[in-house]
Amino acid sequence: MFPEYDVIVVGAGHAGCEAAAAAATMGSSVLLITMNMHTIAQMSCNPAMGGVAKGQIVREIDALGGQSGIVSDKTMIQFRMLNLSKGPAMWSPRCQSDRVLFAQEWRNILESNPNVDFWQDTASQIIVEDGKARGVKTSLGVEIRSKAVVLTNGTFLNGLIHIGEKNFGGGRTGEKSATGITEQLVELGFEAGRMKTGTPPRVDGRSLDYSKMEEQPGDENPSKFSYTDTKPLTQQRSCWITYTNSEVHEILRTGFEKSPMFSGRIKGIGPRYCPSVEDKINRFADKDRHQVFVEPEGWDTVEVYVNGFSTSLPEDVQYAALRKIPGFENAKMFRPGYAIEYDYFPPTQLKSTLETHLIGDLFFAGQINGTTGYEEAACQGLMAGINAHRNVKGLSPFILKRSEAYIGVLIDDLINKGTEEPYRMFTSRAEYRTLLRQDNADIRLTQKGNEIGLASDERLKNVQRKLNAVEEIIAALSATKIAPEEINSALEEIGTATIREKITLTQLIKRPQISIDQLAAVSPKVSEIISAHTEDAIQQAQIHLKYDSYIEKEMLLVEKMNRLEDLTIVENFNYDAVSSLSFEGREKLKRTRPTTIGQASRISGVSQSDISVLMLFIGR
């Protein structure tokens, strides 16, 4: 019935979609198995992409040739660039998405790729032969062969939904959970654990009084995620902010005795940085209010997402508390919030490629690895899809370093440190975040994406044009001097020191108070230099000039760290033969099987003295 595929992807969430699209674009035959063809790329939680550090990941996915940025641009209803008051390393793009259009656009992309086939069924078992994944068996009893398998099961592995004292099996509301895979993998020697996440109630936007809330409009001149020619928004929908209060908190407390989280019925650990509203009230008892973000779910729907009110309390308690929030006095609920527990596999069981140590050609991506968030899942799916394809074709692994991408930071953190709570990306996790900005993801990654056959030649030409433009702008600004009489009055208006003699334009632009656009408005020389260039190139030139010394310092740190990354450790290295290693260090090294000294140095429990011993042992 089925041919043998190069790659089978199990699950069609954000990780599964990126994995299937990447492997198929590079030339692999792909079968995407999903329990429901109508929920491909479903936004199970809030309908938004990006945010702090997450927006950088979406831009990196796009720069490599992935699809999440394009889908986001085509289906957004609002765009905001966060943290503009801070330095460019902190700028983070975020959009509010149309939930229905997002899923529809993803399905269109996958169906338009001739290398992608679909099968609606539940994968219940991995076919393992000679220590390698060679296909799947489904709940219908169908056996489908492949050369590699990517598991992106999300919250479906033995998923259990909780609402108050009620609980029932499910991967998300209205959908059944998946069984069989966890049990088989544990039998094969994998370690499994439980995590939990939650979602808030959905309400009818027609029943809300927005006059009692603070409006949160999109940017006046909205940007976008993709480096391709997707169009920026010309109209946007606003989000809104309101607050809980002491009355809301008191009503919620009446349900605490029926809370599955406080009663111990939920065993899994939830996301620390996205707690339920009952957890916030319990942990921050001194606070008399918490923010609630009121987010529309699309252009043509009245459904509203109540961000900040995630809960698993009984539905009647949820409803009563909601109606005490300003603007929600007459709120009508579409469905209550709930918590969900699911199986995950500690990611220290993975290689840097996201292939498992125990079973060859078996890859894990997304929440199965203990992460939370669409963006974290999507980038893992992309990397797993790339490496599954490269495994099948006999090519070398594709790995991003911590100094090259947030994606590299995320995977390196997971495989070396593991996680005991849902992992979420933050800018603080990246030690080289001045280099890993959202504005330069194409410069960092598009050539790499092109070399592996994912990013198109046209994308690479666009990057080269941008780099050439940046060089031209900087060279012209550096070669052009401006006299005091030409600029001093403008400098006084800006509130920065005047000049006494001619100086180059670059010297002025390096001042923190001055932007290229400000100078262009008062100086015909600057206006002429930048007039022929795109906003993207102008911004890139400005960042380079203002932060040149910081970038140079980070580059030196990267160079120092890369010396350790270049020291390879053979795959079957016998750590038991190195008696000077600490007991904990030896056990962690045997478990993680690092490929370089640099990776070994980042494993939790491996001390600096262990690294010194290893370096001596390999002759360095």
Image (cartoon, rainbow, N blue to C red):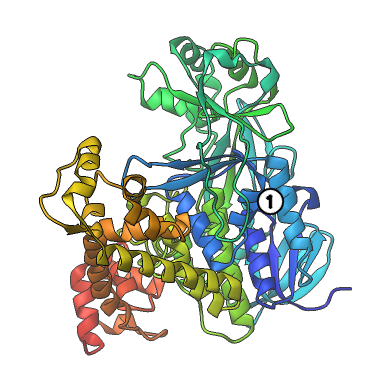
Residue drawn at x 75%, y 38% as measured from the top left: 174
Please name the residue that numbered disc 1 is placed on.
41
Residue at 53% from the left image edge and 36% from the top image edge: 266
Q: Is residue 305 left or right of residue 416?
A: right
Q: On the image, which quarter does residue 83 sit in?
A: top left
Q: In screen coordinates, is 523 left or right of 446?
A: left
Q: Is residue 406 above or below residue 330?
A: below
State which quarter of the image contains the C terminus.
Answer: bottom left
**How many numbered circles does the render carry?**
1
Residue 439, placed above or below residue 609: above
> Helix, strand, or loop for circle 1?
loop
Image coordinates for residue 579, horizontal then vertical, percent: 23, 80
Q: Residue at x 79, y 71 (%)?
A: 114
Residue furthest to the right: 1
Please state which of residues 207 and 575 is positioned toward the viewer in this rendering.
207
What residue sits 35% from the left and 52% below the top? 524
Give the quarter of the figure containing the N terminus: bottom right
Residue at the extreme bottom: 619
**x then y, percent, for residue 585:** 28, 69
Q: Is residue 131 visible?
A: no
Q: Nearer the viewer, residue 196 or 223?
A: 223
Question: Which residue is outermost to the left?
Answer: 500
In this view, the residue in front, 195 or 172, is 172
Residue 457: x %, y % from top left: 59, 76
Q: To which quarter of the image does residue 108 belong?
A: bottom right
Q: Quadrant of residue 43?
A: top right
